[in-house]
Image (spheres, rainbow, N blue to C red):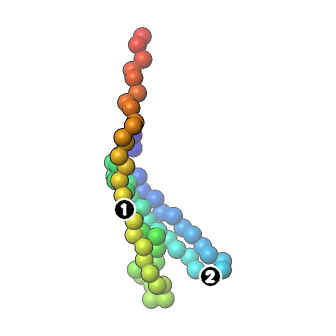
Amino acid sequence: MKLLSVALPITYSSLAGDMKVGFGFRIGGFFFGGDDMMALFSSNQHGFGVYFGGCVPIFKKEPKADKI
């Protein structure tokens, strides 16, 4: 299992004529991020969304070791 993941999604809307650059992190079973980092640095961007959550493996079983 990966312990750490980093994401940098980039989206462009041709209808609105704008670009969004987000970020996301996953540490263990928890994740968090935002959808538009450019809103923090630009005066003409409006709004910024954040998300967070966790994964609880309720029905996931550990793989059995093969006997040789």
Residue 52 is tagged as: 1
Q: Nearer the viewer, residue 50 or 9?
A: 50
Q: Label 2 crowding class (10 Å Cα cut-off): few <14, some 14-19, many 20+?
A: few
Place of residue 40 in the rendered image (x, y in percent of width and height, measured from the top left): 40, 80
Place of residue 44 in the rendered image (x, y in percent of width and height, measured from the top left): 49, 88
Q: Which residue is mark 2?
A: 17
Q: Residue at x 36, y 40 (%)?
A: 58
Q: Residue at x 52, y 74 (%)?
A: 20
Q: Nearer the viewer, residue 53 or 2?
A: 53
Residue 28 is tagged as: none
SS for callout 2: loop
Q: Residue at x 39, y 65 (%)?
A: 51
Place of residue 53 in the rendered image (x, y in percent of width and height, measured from the top left): 36, 58
Residue 52 lies left or right of residue 17; in this view the side is left
Q: State which tag comes first along the sequence, 2 or 1.
A: 2
Going by the picture, which residue comes out furthest to the right? 14
